[in-house]
Image (cartoon, coloured by chain):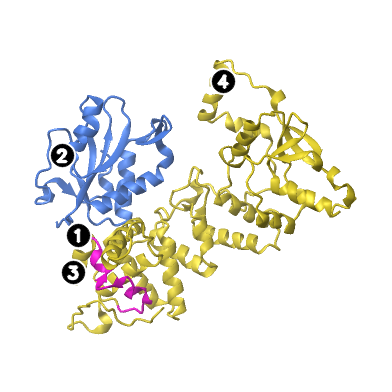
Amino acid sequence: MFNLVDSSPLDVKVDSQIPPNSYVFPFKVVPKGKKINMSKLSNPLDPAKLTPTSKPITEVVSELEGEAKIMDIINGYKANGKVFNPNLFGKFQMISVKDTTVNDVAQRLYDTDNGAGIARNFDERLLSPIRATSQVCGSASVYDGLHTIGQVALFAKHGLFGNDPTDWENFKFPFFVVDEPYPSFTSHAALHTNGKGQKKWGKFDFHRVAVTNVRIYHLLDNKHDNRAEAIQTLCEKYEAWPLPLNHKDNGKAGTQGHIDAIYKWNLPSLRFILKTHKKYWHGTKLDPQAFSLYGNLYEHMTKLKIPTTGVEFDKFLDNFHAVIHECFVGLRQLRIETARAHAAWYKSAYTSRRTSKVEVPYNCALAIVLKIYKKLGGTHHVPGDVVEFNYNGFDIYSFLDQDAVLDKVDHAI
Amino acid sequence: MQFKLTKKCGWFYILQLSHNKIWGFGITIHEAARLREGYCNPSCSKQEFWHMYYGDINQITDLENHLKSEWDNKMLVLFDKKLEWVDPKHNLSGNDIKLFCDERIIDYQYSNLYSVKAEHLPYSPGKYFKYINDDPGKFLEPVTLSHTVL
């Protein structure tokens, strides 16, 4: 799949008057990263500021009172004389297995893989109370927690709690019960608990907890947490702080919200990605294109044992970026143009296939930049991506923007 | 001097609304139509572009995207929707927007972007940059930081 390519299959016009070693790459403007004042940004995982404190709810309430969109609702209720009934709050009760029923409408089919997962990783401390409504007959109708109560009851039947297995049906477990017996409410509550009313954790939340496990609690025996901390350290070193999507600084230069992307690459590749972005584009929002462009460049070159450090490689990288700057301005436009050109190329090259919604392969942008680089007479060894996206007589190069790319390249050579 | 204008050029403009003094910005290919139909007609008042840049449309787009990213939390929110107007509570003026843009154009080496000369500003309805591509030197000048404060 990966071939060491010494020369491009594209026509390369090289002026024979110029000695080979002094060939001057025609695109001369190399973008340079700009220094950012990181002190203006806020890093929620700053090791200097992370402390294992608990915030009182009174403080949370004060923060909420500063949110206009929430206070407008509160004030609306007050203006309309709305009063909510605290007696309708659910109540905690210990309920025995024999007094529990399952609402077939509200509950999903029992997922045995999920059940096996609960059984395999059983930790008494992590079990949630079962949510149920109290029925007229006195039973608790479960609308959330079927898998948990199913496993707990099964464990009880086999005496795994040190209980008498013959009396397992009297085994009790914590329930959170709402006194609302109408069956339609039970299914409505199930919808609310499992979807509508839930604020799911975002990718940054999982990352944050993993990093704080290491930085605050020094829990060093978890491979995933250690990797998360190493990733965070790299991101901080190269000033590309991961932030949650709703953070006030998210989207600014020096930050990023691409949590999936930073986990996708191994640490050496991630280091190359962040270091290269900082060198050439620092001061600009970190576009997701950086990850596949630099990640594939690094990994494909490394696989072919082409050095990714040193004077020659640095010169290649400068020329590589001069191409991006001249033809695409930046990584964002490269990404947009890659998607457009790929769609157009695919439609022509694969006439017998469905061409709507074709995903852009991760190495497509890299291939495009390398093709332009070679077209301009670039001589550095490059990975085989340069010959890809050439099928059925159609090369994606021909589908690039005429004014922004093709004319500029033709004029330069 | 030689101006390098590509085939696809556009405008980046900065304006202050005449009726409420709020500052804003945007990009367009058709400056006259945008001023009339985007701002004068909806506000039923004469509006003007306080400052403008002209050049390669990709660089214009990139400039606007960078400004929107960096100033995201300075943008005005009206009825829960973020607009391309600067929230007055940040006390930012056209000079601040222009300084930001000038610095970006110079730092980032947008080699095909130019500033409209002060003598042609503010741009108001009825003005036309006719034949700007044929005689760019008449209307445009390179961006320099010394020209920032208007």
Chain to which mark 2 belongs: B
Q: Is disc 1 surrounded by few (<14), some (14 to 19) or many (20+) residues within 10 Å?
A: few
Whether A185 is drawn above or below A83: the answer is below
Question: Which residue occupies the foreground of this view, A408 or A52?
Answer: A408
The answer to whether marks 4 and 2 mark residues whose Cβ atoms lie closer than 8 Å is no
Q: Quadrant of the N terminus of chain B?
A: bottom left
For the point 18% across and 83% down, which residue is it?
A16
Comparing labels 3 and 4, the label whose residue is closer to the camera: 4
Chain holding disc 4? A
Q: Is residue A389 one of those drawn in magenta?
A: yes
Which amino acid type is shown beneath numbered disc 4?
Tyr
Which one is in front in this view, the residue at disc 1 or the one at disc 4? Answer: 4
Q: Position of residue A388 (x, y in %)?
A: 34, 73
Dot 1 lies on which element?
helix
A13 is within the stretch colored magenta: no
How far apart are labels 4 and 2 at the CA level?
55 Å
Q: Quadrant of the C terminus of chain B?
A: top left
Of badges 1 and 2, nearer the viewer stands 1
Q: What amino acid does circle 3 point to? A: Asp
How packed mark 3 is, by other alpha carbons closer than 10 Å (few <14, some 14-19, many 20 or more), is few
Apparent colour of chain B: blue
The percent position of residue A69, horizontal first and vertical second, equals 51, 29
Task: Decide which of A245, A174 is in the foreground and name it.
Answer: A174
Check contact, mark 3 vs mark 4: CB within 8 A.
Answer: no
Q: Which residue is mark 4?
A: A77
**The disc label shown at residue A403, or none:** 1
Q: Which residue is mark 2?
A: B120
Q: For chain A, what colour was chosen?
A: yellow
SS for callout 4: helix
The reply to whether residue B33 is in sight is: yes
